[in-house]
Image (cartoon, grey):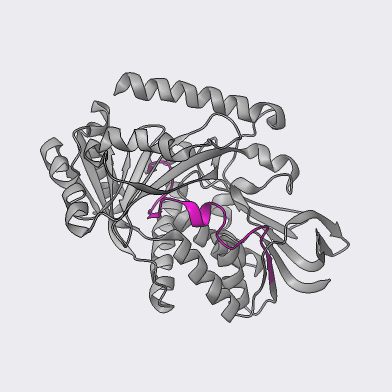
Amino acid sequence: NIDADICIIGGGLTGISSAINLSKKGYSVILCEARKIGWGASGRNGGQLGIGMRKDQFTIEKKLGLRHAKELWSLGLEAVEDVKNLIKENEIDCHLVNGVMSTACFEKDIDEYKFEIEHLSKNYDFHGYKFFNKSEIREEINSKIYLAGMLNSGSYHLNPLKLTIGLAKLAKQKKVKIFENTPVEKIYENNDRVTIITKKGVIKANKVIVACNGYLDNLLGSKKNKFIPINNYIVATEPLGEKKAREIIKNNYAVCDTRFIIDYYRFSEDWRMIFGGGETFTSNFVKNSKSFVLKRMLKVFPQLKNVKIEYSWGGTLAITINRLPHFGTMMNEKLYYAFGYSGHGLALSVLAGKLIAEKIDGHNERFKFFSDINHMSIPLGSVFRRPIYSSAILYYKIRDYLNS
């Protein structure tokens, strides 16, 4: 049974970033992780460190207004810079590489790319996008399926598990107490403090941060109805060597296509193709994720048909209806949460920890840019959110197929 200023639940990037930022401000911090550090999406993701939000700026402007959209854009830029600085200052060996390429699967994407490049240049003074026509994208990505491309030189890719573990080591240096294999069973308000119940003991704290994303379960009650948990899958090939890898992706960019159910891929530091794609209809993971993803990879790169797949894995993401992260507080601002990065959380989750720490320390201005976003709840979410998700996935699979 222990006592602290802050208790954090979740050993992914949101939780670890919160711990680092709060410890710097002088708070005593305890972090509980149900399994191992980085076990969830923070360690399993595709490794794309992207600027901005999951939705394009023009869409965000229509939903939230130009001023709010511009604040989110600035925060998205800051998120990537913060991660880069943390890597550099703490010498975290996570193989940071510049450049993420979006690849067009549909004719309409070509005009949308051109519009976005002009819109960001004119309204945001951002000049980090570059358009690639059909012949140019085939020079960069050795696949016949893409019609155009848009390079984002403000985005990067890296090894996400190495980043997460590196930041956890930094948190320990800052005297954060980390307890793995310590699932939290219940949180309740106790006068002016919060009590956190685990199987191994009781934690009493002034504040609690819930940073579980797609693994939230029932800790926040009906808040789980603000997102849909989805299962996504990745494979890793045997090492191909730099020469062969650059015959496939000339400049070693990470790639993400424009389908609703996206393919995303990059080369690892030892030149393995890390290829992600495909989502399942139920809460159960597919038994053979290797063959599940391999089919998608060979549609993009049939030249890899004789390459050995050495690893495969799956994990759970939290997708909000509007694809924007959901921040908020409960228990009279004794409990703080952030989740719903919608597949764009590598940089935003680190930023979330920084903004939560600011909020706890009495500075609410930037946290509000996320907490003020209105998020739709799924009616009777416990019953319907999985069927709704399954129906949506089927619809978009059919749409992707018909448009391809």
Against 94, residue 211 (above or below) is above
Q: Quadrant of residue 18?
A: bottom right
Residue 309: x, y in percent?
36, 46
Against 176, residue 286 (above or below) is above
- Mark yes or no: residue 276 visible: yes
Residue 305: x, y in percent?
27, 38
In percent of the image, x 43 and y 45: which residue is there? 234
Against 305, residue 386 (above or below) is above
Residue 211: x, y in percent?
63, 56
- Mark yes or no: residue 64 visible: no
The N terminus lies in quadrant:
bottom right
Secondary structure, magenta segment, majority class: loop
In percent of the image, x 24 and y 36: which residue is there? 302
In percent of the image, x 59 and y 25: which residue is there? 388
Check if residue 224 falls in the magenta segment: no
Could you say which is closer to the camera, residue 369 or residue 304?
304
Q: Quadrant of residue 135?
A: top left
Q: In the picture provided, is 133 more to the left or to the right than 367?
A: left
